[in-house]
Image (cartoon, grey):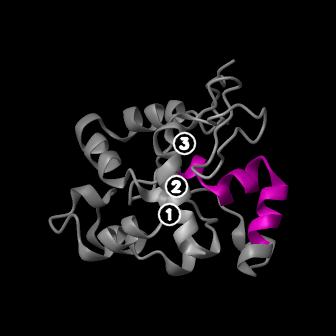
Amino acid sequence: MKMEKKSESPCVPDKKLAAGCGLFCPSRTAYIGAHEDPKRLEGLAARTGQPLEKLQCNGCRSDKRSYYCENLCTMYKCAAAKRIDFCGQCAEYPCEELKAFQAAMPHRLELWKSQARIKEAGHEKWFEEMVDHYSCPACGTINSTYDMVCWKCGTAPSCAYVGQHKDENIRRMASKK
């Protein structure tokens, strides 16, 4: 069963949930933890040493962003200073900082593809496609790139992203240890 598109659901295109770098906020661990799976947020707090309240996140463009996004992300501030919505709109795209950011973590594998799709189809269409891309084919739950199985129903792979990038995710995560 697919998730219904309701106005309070992250399934409705909402620019505050579309990061300027091209990440889809509802598929991020902090967002899922803050909105649906509090135990996930507790685990993230234990791994990072950050208090729970610093990990709460309502999306890249919201007034409540996770510690990382608020304090360490430079793409958001750069885009705001240049008065653009997405990095792909910048004359310097892709800059060295964005290249380094993209290469650093598995959940960023599709940033170039996302920027191209946003430019081609608009952020609303891209957003709708991302809902499908990160939704469990069995129950419709949005999963993160690190959920090898759906965190709600156990279906594997958890979503199309994981189906396409599972091996690369595992390889990159193993190299981080």
- Residue drawn at (74%, 79%) of the image: 50
Where residue 145 appears, as percent x and y from the top left, is 57, 50
Amino acid marked by disc 1: Arg
- Residue drawn at (78%, 37%) of the image: 152
Amino acid marked by disc 3: Val
Label 2: how many Cα within 10 Å (few below 14, some 14–19, many 20+): some
Q: Earlier in the sequence, mark 2 or mark 3?
A: 3
Could you tell me how far apart the alpha carbons at marks 2 and 1 are, in whole angstroms? 5 Å
Where residue 90 appears, as percent x and y from the top left, is 21, 63
Judging by the rendered image, the residue that carries numbered circle 1 is 172
Instruction: Give SS at disc 3.
Output: helix
Judging by the rendered image, the residue that carries numbered circle 3 is 162
Look at the image and tell me whether residue 61 can be seen: no
Q: Which residues are magenta?
A: 25-45
Q: Is residue 83 above or below residue 28?
A: below
Q: Is residue 38 magenta?
A: yes
Amino acid marked by disc 2: Asn
Q: Determine whether, in the image, residue 32 is placed left or right of residue 107.
A: right
The label nearer to you, 1 versus 3, is 1
Judging by the rendered image, the residue that carries numbered circle 2 is 169
Q: Main secondary structure of the magenta part?
A: helix
Q: Is residue 74 magenta?
A: no
If the image is split into quadrants, where does the N terminus sit? top right
Between residue 67 and residue 148, name the one nearer to us. Answer: 148
Dots 2, 3 in contact, CB < 8 A? yes
